[in-house]
Image (cartoon, rainbow, N blue to C red):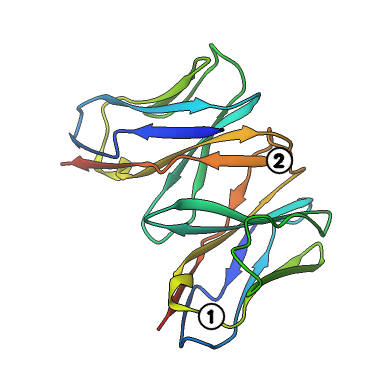
Amino acid sequence: EDQVTQSPEALRLQEGESSSLNCSYTVSGLRGLFWYRQDPGKGPEFLFTLYSAGEEKEKERLKATLTKKESFLHITAPKPEDSATYLCAVGAGTYKYIFGTGTRLKVLA
Amino acid sequence: DAGVIQSPRHEVTEMGQEVTLRCKPISGHNSLFWYRQTMMRGLELLIYFNNNVPIDDSGMPEDRFSAKMPNASFSTLKIQPSEPRDSAVYFCASSPVGGATDTQYFGPGTRLTVL
């Protein structure tokens, strides 16, 4: 069965304290791996798409990497404004996304 | 671009009432998705339209839920009759093509509370 698991469920960091969020997946035929950021009361906002193992993408303090079994979202020197829930989704089959339940990140000033 | 537009943003209704949620996808996008988000189950796909045609409605919980897409710029999700367990945030998303490799862009959501 296709499955996406994110860890940890919640993470508290001090400002400037770098860390990584994990998204592990089991899917028959990965079509793409997507990272989204969701702020309270808002819809998921697209961050990155990764298509093949070894691929990396960066945006400001965020860097996403992909292996054959998992993806990491690395946050370097985070700021309080990086606080949000980060969602991982896997494209599977013809059109479906399978979402993880997210990691709630809180960055303290 | 205005992005995906949803209305209303908040809806409070009483059990048994009909609820209609509305969505305007990004212009030029061929695919539209309706999702439901709860704390317990996260984001769940309810229905997927491609070129205004419903392709997969296997996620629709039961016959009380229905969705339509009469044209490329408008879709509705209707719940009749509504029940307290339908309380959730409902998101609409659109994508240029709709494949599993394609990025989906989400609207701001409608927070539904059924009393």
Pointer 1 chain:
B
Res B96 → quadrant: top right
Q: Say whether residue B7 is left or right of residue A74.
A: right
Q: Secondary structure at mark 2?
A: loop
Q: Position of residue A55 (x, y in %)?
A: 55, 15
Is A40 placed above or below A78 here?
below
Q: Position of residue B53 (x, y in %)?
A: 83, 58
Q: Secondary structure at mark 1?
A: loop
Disc 1 with disc 2 on a shared chain: no
Tell me if mark 2 has few (under 14), some (14-19) or many (20+) residues whose alpha carbon lies within 10 angstroms of its own. Answer: some
Is A83 placed above or below B20 here?
above
Q: Say whether residue B38 is left or right of residue A49.
A: left
Tell me if mark 1 has few (under 14), some (14-19) or many (20+) residues whose alpha carbon lies within 10 angstroms of its own. Answer: many
Q: Which of the two residues, B74 or B48, is positioned nearer the viewer here?
A: B48
Q: Which of the two residues, A46 or A66, is positioned nearer the viewer here?
A: A66
Nearer to us of marks 1 and 2 is: 1
Res B60 → quadrant: bottom right
Q: Amino acid at mark 2?
A: Tyr
Residue at the spot 62% in from the left edge and 68% down from the top edge? B62
Q: In this orientation, does residue B76 appear?
A: no
Read off the residue under disc 1.
Answer: B82
Screen quadrant of the N terminus of chain B = bottom right
Label for residue A95? 2
Pointer 2 chain:
A
Residue at the spot 71% in from the left edge and 40% down from the top edge? A95
Q: Amino acid at mark 1?
A: Ser
Screen quadrant of the C terminus of chain B = bottom left
Q: Position of residue A86 (x, y in %)?
A: 40, 40
Residue at the spot 62% in from the left edge and 22% down from the top edge? A51
Q: Which of the two residues, B103 or B40, is positioned nearer the viewer here?
A: B40
Label 1 vs label 2: CA separation? 29 Å
Q: Position of residue B6 (x, y in %)?
A: 59, 68
